[in-house]
Image (cartoon, coloured by chain):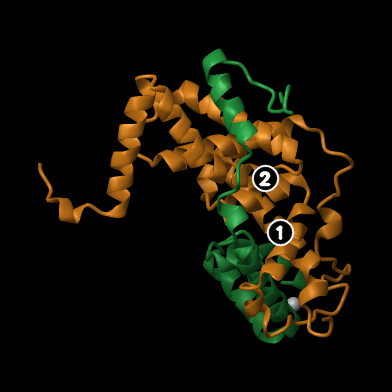
């Protein structure tokens, strides 16, 4: 197995979807190749970073909604058509 | 069967609230519609903004999603929470809008994937990432960087990464939402993560600050 193939089957390996003989070959390569171990670690870090990217920040879970949008949605319900949100006609 | 009120947990009481609200919605009560929109539009807008790059598209998507939801209220069965149901509807609307938009010269995923020599060895030396990468998970700045890099992924890969890792749909649900096979979901997710790894590498590898 080459380093390129290690990269290709990385996700299958991590999710334990590699069939037994392939898994052993994969493991044997990792035992001898520090570069692929490094690659695997950075890949795992990437997964964690990706999953954390939108966690907990307020704008990511609940955004502040412009009142014009709420009004447009409610108006659209009664007419059954989409309403433009920017019908600010006579604001003075 | 009657249960004492003390055993009512959070989830159950939410479902009771949902059921009551849906009943009022079906009865056509105007106030109920406004309550629903005010209660759920914030989380729906946050979802829409993750998928769509323009604010106008995100706002339009939330509006479309609510209109779809109003029409589909009869099909809401109360087995899932109202928020879960609305989440899926807004994701669907966002994906539909993305499909309609032909994106300006999209980057190909290939140029973002790790490069190898013809003998299968890495084309560039592999550097470990900083020890404190775990700390970065807690830093707002690092999260913003990761979001920015996710945004650089080509849409077919970005959407799979968002659905699986951020919106937390499983492989089967993601396949349904995108109308692709489960194997395609797995392949795209892997490539999206490989590409994201490459994009983040300069920021997290040992020697660069
Ligand atoms: Zn290797």
Q: Is residue A47 above or below residue B11?
A: below
Splitting the image into 4 quarters, where does residue B74 fall?
Answer: top left
Q: Chain of mark 2?
A: B
Q: Where is mark 1, residue-wise? A: B147
Q: Residue at x 38, y 40 (%)?
A: B80
Callout 1–callout 2 Cβ contact below 8 Å = no
Q: Residue at x 87, y 39 (%)?
A: B104
Element under label 2? helix
Lateral position of residue B208 relative to residue B156, left or right:
right
Report x, y in % for residue B4.
12, 51
Viewer-nearest residue: B175 or A79: A79
Q: Which chain is orange?
A: B
Splitting the image into 4 quarters, where does residue B51 fall?
Answer: top right
Q: Which mark is residue B169?
A: none
Q: CA distance from mark 1 to mark 2?
A: 12 Å
Q: Residue furthest left?
A: B1
Viewer-nearest residue: A57 or A2: A57
> From the image, which quarter does the C terminus of chain A lie in?
top right
Q: Which chain is green?
A: A
Q: Which mark is residue B49?
A: 2
Q: Is residue B36 above or below residue A39?
A: above
The CB of the residue at mark 1 lies under 8 Å from ligand 1: no
Q: Residue at x 71, y 59 (%)?
A: B147
Q: Is residue B36 above or below residue B205?
A: above
Lateral position of residue B70 relative to residue B178, left or right:
left
Q: Earlier in the sequence, mark 1 or mark 2?
A: 2
């Amino acid at each position: 197995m080459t380093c390129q193939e290690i990269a290709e089957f990385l996700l299958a390996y991590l999710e334990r979807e590699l069939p037994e003989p392939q898994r052993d070959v994969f493991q044997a390569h990792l035992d001898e190749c520090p570069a692929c171990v490094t690659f695997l670690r950075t890949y795992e870090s990437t997964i964690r970073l990706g999953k954390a990217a939108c966690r907990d920040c307020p704008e990511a879970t609940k955004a502040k909604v412009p009142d014009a949008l709420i009004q447009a949605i409610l108006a659209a319900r009664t007419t059954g058509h989409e309403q433009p949100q920017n019908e600010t006609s006579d604001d003075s | 069967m009657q249960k004492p009120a003390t055993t009512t947990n959070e989830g159950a009481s939410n479902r009771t609230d949902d059921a009551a609200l849906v009943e009022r919605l079906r009865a056509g009560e105007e106030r109920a519609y406004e309550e629903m929109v005010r209660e759920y539009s914030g989380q729906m807008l946050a979802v829409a903004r993750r998928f769509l790059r323009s604010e106008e598209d995100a706002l339009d998507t939330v509006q479309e999603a609510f209109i779809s939801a109003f029409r589909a209220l009869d099909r809401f069965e109360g087995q899932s929470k109202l928020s879960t149901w609305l989440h899926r509807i807004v994701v669907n609307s966002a994906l539909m809008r993305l499909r309609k938009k032909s994106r300006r010269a999209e980057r190909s995923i290939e140029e973002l994937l790790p490069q190898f020599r013809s003998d299968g060895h890495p084309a560039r030396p592999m550097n470990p990432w900083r020890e404190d990468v775990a700390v970065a998970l807690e830093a707002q700045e690092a999260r913003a960087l990761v979001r920015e890099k996710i945004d650089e992924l080509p849409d077919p890969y970005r959407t799979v990464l968002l659905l699986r890792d951020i919106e937390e749909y499983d492989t089967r649900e993601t396949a349904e939402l995108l109308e692709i096979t489960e194997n395609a979901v797995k392949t795209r997710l892997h490539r999206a993560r490989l590409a994201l790894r490459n994009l983040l590498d300069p920021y997290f590898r040992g020697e660069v600050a």
